[in-house]
Amino acid sequence: MKGEAQGKKRDPFKIVVIITAILGILAAACIAGSRYAAKLKQDRLQEMTDEVTSRNEELKVEYEAALAEFERENASGANLAWPIPRQEGWDVIDLTSYPLENTTTVTMTRQETLYNGMLLVNEWHSRPDDFLEDQLVSVSKATNRTVSVRDNNVRMFPDAVEALRQAIEDAKAQNLEYFVAHEGYRSWDEQNALFQAQMERYKEYSEAEQIERAKKAVNMPGTSDYNAGQTIRLILYKKGDDAVNNLKFFESDQGVWMYHNAWKYGLVFRFPLADYPIKGTQDKSYKTGVSVKLQNFRYVGKGNAAVMHTLDLCMEEYLDYLTEHPHIAVFEDGQLRYEIVREYVGGGDPFTVHVTQKSGVTNRVTSLDNMGYVVTVFEY
């Protein structure tokens, strides 16, 4: 019996079934593991894809912002190589070492450029002989009587009249009324009559002494800023109201507002004296040649006025500044507003002027300065 037991063989079918079952379990385990690994791989791949997509979106936003900034600066005309301006308020940047970009030349005549605001007329620079009165207009008529005047003989050049109209209109919007354009352009004959009357007061002196004494109160004909047709003398007047009529102009709210804001319209206070028109004003009489307290505003154009205001320069000082810095840029809150170039043209007529063709330029004004140069303002 024992021998039979030892000699008995195991059932091969059962063995096959067991092995098959084990292999099935192993196969199922492998399949499950493979599926799990595939899912992990798929999840990681999706995670990586999401990360890449998100980063690409961020890069796209950054790129579009950078491109918009570049296009904005390029459209404004500002060159990224220029010195960086202040980002708040007005700033003037010296570009003397930077050439005017994308230039061409234009031919202009003296008559096209004599009346655009920068013609310097003072004790040392007489009005040029080719100055004409043809383009002068009545302040009252040109503004449809919205600007009060002493009479219809108060005249200026059109751009100056428009600047005055806008300034007074905005002042009125703030309940600052009663401005009167009291005196504008003076002809050579009118200036001569005033000067001769002043000389008559000193007739007991020699002619040379009469002239010197008269010049302290009235400029010689052809050397008064009134003779340029860009200057206006303002007063306050309200019919029957002595409280208004007796106000000193720069002690009134109207006068103070005009002093602080006229430059925004292209007008500047012409003859600063020590503490006049307001306390703290620096004396510029040594440059202007005028030491009389006047209520005169002079049209020079918005770009030039912005520089004069920002750097606290009178007209004579400004032209000296442009002699040393013949190419400048003017920024407001980091944005280019004006590019200004001064170049020599001599006494020729016509003459050529260099201008920029950069994108972003909305206006260009070229003005003779009565010193052999032209000042060109590019507005952006």
Image: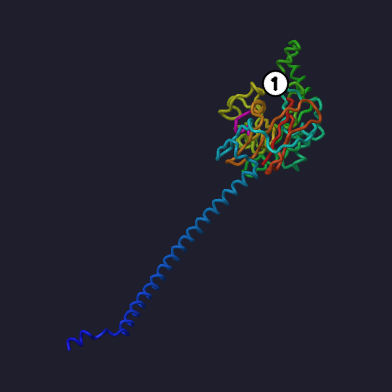
Q: Secondary structure at mark 1?
A: loop
Residue 217 place in picture, x, y as percent = 70, 21
Using the rendered view, name the quadrant where residue 364 is placed.
Answer: top right
Q: Residue furthest left?
A: 2
Residue depicted at x 60% and y 31% = 311
For the question of whether residue 273 can be seen, the reply is: yes
- Of the 4 image quadrants, the one containing the C terminus is top right
- Of the 4 image quadrants, the one containing the N terminus is bottom left
Q: Nearer the viewer, residue 97 or 281?
A: 97
Residue depicted at x 59% and y 49% = 67
Main SS, magenta residues: helix
Q: Residue furthest bottom?
A: 1
Using the rendered view, name the quadrant where residue 192 is placed.
Answer: top right
Q: Is residue 348 magenta?
A: no
Asked if residue 229 is positioned above or below residue 8 in the image, the reply reads above
Residue depicted at x 65% and y 22% = 287
- Which residue is the site of mark 1? 217
Using the rendered view, name the quadrant where residue 177 is placed.
Answer: top right
Residue 66 place in picture, x, y as percent = 57, 48
Q: In the image, 265: left or right of 87?
A: right
Structural crowding at the residue carrying mark 1, measured as other residues with C-alpha within 10 Å and reported as few (<14), some (14–19) or many (≥20): some
For the question of whether residue 239 can be seen, the reply is: no
Q: Nearer the viewer, residue 76 or 299?
A: 76
Q: How many marks?
A: 1
Q: In the image, 122: left or right of 311?
A: right
Please, what is the three-letter code of the amino acid marked with disc 1?
Ala
Q: Which residues are magenta?
A: 307-313
Asked if residue 301 is positioned above or below residue 16 in the image, the reply reads above
